[in-house]
Amino acid sequence: MSPFPALPLWFTWAFLSAIFASASAVLGKVGLENIEADLATLIRTVVVSIFLPLLIIATGKWSNPFELSQQTWVFITLSGIASGLSSFCFFRALKQGDASLVVPIDRLSLLLVALIGFAFLGERPSATSWTGLLLIAGGGLLLSLAE
């Protein structure tokens, strides 16, 4: 159940994700001061690889991964590769640019996800949603041009 009863549970998780993503960007920027971006990405990945199994076990959500379907394995593996490449590129950008400029460009993924969801997943955002996505994308581009 959501701690905010008027909001769906997915919204709570998405909002918490935004908080942790912003903390990750700021902490990562500070941490990149005296280290190469690629090594920082590796260290971050190792930390995540240790932390997440502990979190999953602690929350009682562990199940046997070998019982998953082949399709699930393929798509989760591809997602992991995409996530790794995203982190690799993000940390390189963060090493070279201000977090306040890098993050909005990185978040152009919002518009890309909506377009891919529309084309391949049958998702149909409302006109209001498309307007919001275009405003976010436009804002990200404006911020990058402010440099």
Image (cartoon, helix red, strand yellow):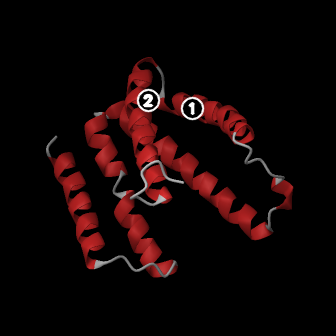
Q: How many marks?
A: 2
| Of the pair 12 and 128, the residue shown nearer to us | 12
User: How far across and down, in percent of the image, does residue 127 sit?
Assistant: 26, 78
Q: Is residue 67 left or right of residue 24?
A: right
Which part of the image, by quadrant, shows the C terminus?
Answer: top left
Which amino acid is tagged 2?
Answer: Gly
Q: Residue at x 65, y 33 (%)?
A: 51
Q: Residue at x 44, y 22 (%)?
A: 31
Is residue 35 shown above or below 137? above
Residue marked by disc 1 = 44
Residue marked by disc 2 = 28
Residue extending furthest toward the top:
34
Q: Is residue 68 left or right of residue 8?
A: right
Residues at discs 2 and 1 in contact (Cβ within 8 Å): yes
Is residue 17 shown above or below 73? above
Dot 1 surroundings within 10 Å: few (below 14), some, or many (20 or more)? Answer: some
Q: In the rendering, which numbered label is found on residue 18?
A: none
Which part of the image, by quadrant, shows the N terminus?
Answer: bottom right
Is residue 26 shown above or below 6? above
